[in-house]
């Protein structure tokens, strides 16, 4: 026996299913007894399962209720509709729970806010339009490249100098919900204190209290900065006169700090170049010829710093002799660098004068003898 079912019955059933699954124009989100989603906001990682329940209404008499969705399934139990998704594959979705009001008054509905997120594939740090070492007192731009993150509008990028945060990076405004890549930048002024510092950037998805806690974070590797700067002397570049006694050691230090490491050149002004390429100039036994102005130049590829020293070499103090005393050549050489001497000896009102040139001894009978260098070929006349 063949059962005949009128075609208008199928049309009515199909229409009811259509009204339940498809949103009709005239949705009112401000109605008094509107549907309520639990939770009121969903945050779900792309590819993960999720679910939400909708209480359609408490006092409405409508028989037309439903849930619009782009993904997942829903089941109805009285006035409660359960929406479930096994695998969230949509980046922009917002289910609508609704019921029909009186005839020709449209629908009362509520939208469920759904945020689908994806942590970055990678985060890297570098400089914009720059490679190699930086130079002190120059400005540079740090950049943080974040690849394939969603939603990028919820991403906060922070730059760090060591453990110290430098501030958030700047980027273009991007409201895209699908995964996107973005470059964040921050300007810095390089100084010598930045040499050897580790820079890094951190990308954090801030998804609110409904999101995962703590928020998803991906950090870059550290970038070690190299800063070149010209040599810098820690003390004054011009020193007060340095007095040293003949025969004593002399040590001048013009150590500087620079990157690359500086080389040193010593000059006894006006133009006498000294041999050592060191920050320290040492003279074992100072003599009169070592007096004068010294210039120490510390140089590297960035610049040069010059430090000057004024050295005064004074002779040793005079000596006393009583009775007959002989000044030997070895004593003269030790005291006066074997230079030609003028000897003055006083006893009451009489004085004897003579010369000693290091070739023979000189005998004197006096209570006080004073010796000093002189540039004459012969001793002064008595």
Image: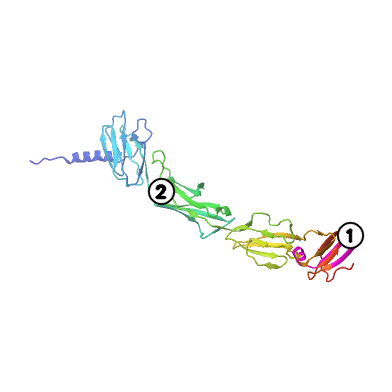
- List x then y, in percent, for residue 213: 40, 40
- The relative height of residue 102 versus residue 355 in the rendered view (above or below) is above
Give residue 15's quadrant in the image.
top left
Nearer to the camera, 356 or 122: 356
- List x then y, in percent, for residue 177: 39, 47
The reply to whether dot 1 and dot 2 touch (C-beta < 8 Å) is no
Nearer to the camera, 250 or 162: 250
Nearer to the camera, 240 or 71: 240
Which residue was labeled with disc 2? 176
Q: Does the magenta stretch include residue 48?
A: no
70 to the left or right of 236:
left
Q: What element carries label 1?
A: strand
Lower position in the chain sequence, tag 1 or tag 2 = 2
- List x then y, in percent, for residue 75: 26, 37
**From this viewpoint, is residue 374 visible?**
no
Which residue was labeled with disc 1? 347
Q: In which quarter of the image is the C terminus?
A: bottom right
**From this viewpoint, is residue 294 visible?**
yes
Magenta span = 331-354
């Amino acid at each position: 026996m063949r059962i005949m079912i009128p075609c208008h019955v199928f049309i009515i059933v199909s229409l009811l299913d259509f009204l339940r699954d498809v949103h009709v124009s005239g949705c009112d989100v401000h109605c008094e007894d509107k549907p309520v989603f639990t939770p009121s906001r969903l945050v779900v990682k792309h590819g993960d399962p999720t679910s939400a329940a909708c209480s359609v209404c408490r006092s409405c008499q409508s028989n037309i209720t439903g849930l619009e969705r782009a993904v997942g399934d829903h089941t109805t139990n009285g006035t409660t509709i359960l929406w479930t998704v096994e695998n969230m594959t949509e980046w922009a979705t917002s289910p609508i729970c609704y019921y029909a009001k009186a005839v020709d008054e449209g629908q009362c509905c509520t939208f469920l806010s759904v945020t689908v997120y994806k942590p970055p594939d990678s985060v890297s740090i570098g400089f914009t339009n720059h490679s190699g070492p930086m130079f002190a007192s120059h400005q540079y731009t740090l950049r943080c490249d974040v690849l394939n993150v969603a939603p990028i509008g919820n991403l906060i990028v922070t730059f760090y100098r060591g453990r110290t945060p430098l501030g958030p990076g700047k980027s273009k405004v991007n409201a895209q919900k699908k995964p996107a890549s973005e470059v964040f930048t921050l300007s810095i002024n390089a100084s010598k204190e930045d040499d050897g510092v580790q820079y890094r950037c951190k990308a954090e998805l801030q998804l609110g209290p409904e999101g995962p806690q703590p928020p998803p974070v991906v950090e870059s590797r550290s970038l070690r900065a190299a800063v070149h700067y010209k040599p810098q002397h820690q003390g004054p570049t011009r020193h007060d006169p340095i007095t040293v006694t003949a025969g004593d050691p002399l040590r001048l230090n013009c150590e500087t700090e620079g990157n690359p490491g500086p080389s040193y050149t010593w000059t006894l002004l006006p133009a006498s170049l000294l041999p050592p390429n060191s920050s320290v100039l040492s003279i074992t036994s100072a003599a009169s010829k070592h007096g004068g102005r010294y210039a120490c130049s510390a140089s590297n590829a960035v610049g040069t710093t010059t430090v000057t020293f004024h050295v005064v070499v004074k002779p040793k103090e005079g000596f006393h002799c009583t009775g007959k005393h002989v000044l030997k050549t070895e004593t003269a050489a030790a005291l006066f660098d074997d230079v030609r001497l003028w000897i003055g000896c006083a006893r009451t009102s009489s004085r004897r004068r003579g010369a000693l040139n290091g070739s023979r001894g000189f005998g004197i009978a006096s209570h006080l003898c004073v010796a000093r260098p002189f540039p004459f070929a012969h001793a002064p006349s008595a």
